[in-house]
Amino acid sequence: MQTAADRPEAPTAIRTDLGAIFVSLELSRSTWLITSLSPGGGEKMSKHVVRGGDVAALLERFAQLRKKTRARTGKVFPFVVIQEAGLEGFWIDRVLRNEGIESHVVDPASIATSRRRRRAKTDRIDGEALVRALLAYKRGEPRVCAMVKAPTPEEEDRRRLCRERKVLIAERVRHVNRVKGLLFSQGISGYEPQRRDRRERLDTLQTGDGHLLPDHLKAQVCRELDRLELLLEQIKAVEAERDVLLAAQQVTAPATMLLDIKGIGPEFAAILWSEGLFRHFDNRRQVASYAGLAPTPWQSGSVDREQGVSKAGNPRLRTIIQLAWLRLRHQPQSALALWFEERVRRNGGRHKKTTIVALARKLLVALWKYVTAGVVIEGAVMKAA
């Protein structure tokens, strides 16, 4: 008689002996999708939709989940919530933490997805994927996802000055280029809209064929100058606020320490401080990775090549590359500048752009050590007191 061999029980897809209620939030402007996995509820995930921005409905749904779980198990379980970092910022995370709920904000790019060319993507699928990632993260699985460290309201508000200034500078460039383009179409070059005598010079301009500016063109340029002058005033106001903020810092504050180094002005010091160096990093690789300056090797079998820097971190912190170019001018005898010159010389004067990125990474790590541990950069020249 033929007998079937004993087969082990098939493992369940999801652990059901949970110690908490795991919830993911898929957020949009119109709706919030709440996906949850509760103890005693089996492997099926519950899904519920509330109106976008309705915190009261969200907390009411949490109360319902806790009530149902208590009815099934006789116990009260805490909540563990996850959401993706995005347009909503961190205010929802702060609301949940104020309610005593464990909340996590995850980098959406760190969640593993299917590598198929055409894959299904819906809010329901994404909500379940977030719950599974949260379960793995709480189990302690390494590198399952990257959780974002939410800044405090003060830290988040402090970095707005540098970001606003960058936006204003970009708008200023657009208006200047537009004025120059309008005049160049009439054969006029050499006009600088940012000069103080821009209005007086505009009245004396002549086209390439020897005529005064047409009335409508002159009126359009004047309106562009009106907007440009407003931008210049706003830039000055933002820079004044930035300088007041830096002046109010203590002597041992990172921003003040950065200002003591020759070649670092208020703008670079404010960006480096507000965008990165106020955070805690465990090692130098974390510093480079946060700025998107970490290398990304591609190694498989006999294939071994470098893809360049990841550019996956804070793009505003990569202004350190501009500072690296300036360091060659203001700190030519420092150890890092001499390393750059020697590296370029060995390459026959080539690969300067690649080497400057490596210098920027070394400079960022050196500045991090300087502001956290007081390790002075070798050969660095400090500003005169």
Image: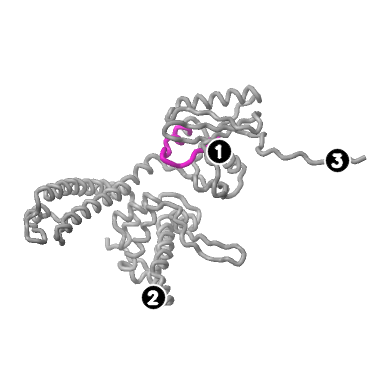
User: Type of residue at label 3?
Assistant: Ala
Relative image position of residue 108 (x, y in whole percent): 49, 45
Give the residue type that dot 1 points to. Answer: Ile
Tell which tag, 2 or 3, sits nearer the viewer. 3
Residue 64 in percent (x, y) is at: 55, 23
Give the x, y percent position of residue 164.
Answer: 30, 46
Looking at the image, residue 31 lies above or below residue 166: above
At 55% from the left and 45% from the top, the residue drawn is 119
Q: Distance between the residues labelled 1 and 3?
A: 38 Å
Relative depth, front residue between 275 and 249: 275
Residue at x 50%, y 28% (from the top left corner): 49
As shown in the figure, which amino acid type bears the numbered disc 2? Gly
Q: Earlier in the sequence, mark 1 or mark 3?
A: 3
| Residue range corresponding to the magenta coloring | 80-96
Q: Is mark 3 on a helix, strand or loop?
A: loop
Work out how far the residue at label 2 is from the one at label 3, CA to CA, in angstroms.
Answer: 74 Å
Q: How far apart are marks 2 and 1 (CA)?
A: 52 Å
Name the residue that disc number 3 marks. 4
Check disc 2: other Cα within 10 Å, few if <14, some if 14-19, many if 20+. few
Disc marking residue 187: none
Residue at the front extreme, as displayed = 209
Q: Which of 300 and 317 is in front in this view?
A: 300
> What is the secondary structure assignment of the residue under circle 2?
loop
> Mark 2 touching mark 3, by CB under 8 A?
no
Colour style of the rendered protein structure: one colour
Q: Residues within 10 Å of mark 1 (few under 14, many from 20)?
A: few
Location of the C terminus by quadrant is bottom left
Closer to the camera in the image, 261 or 312:
312
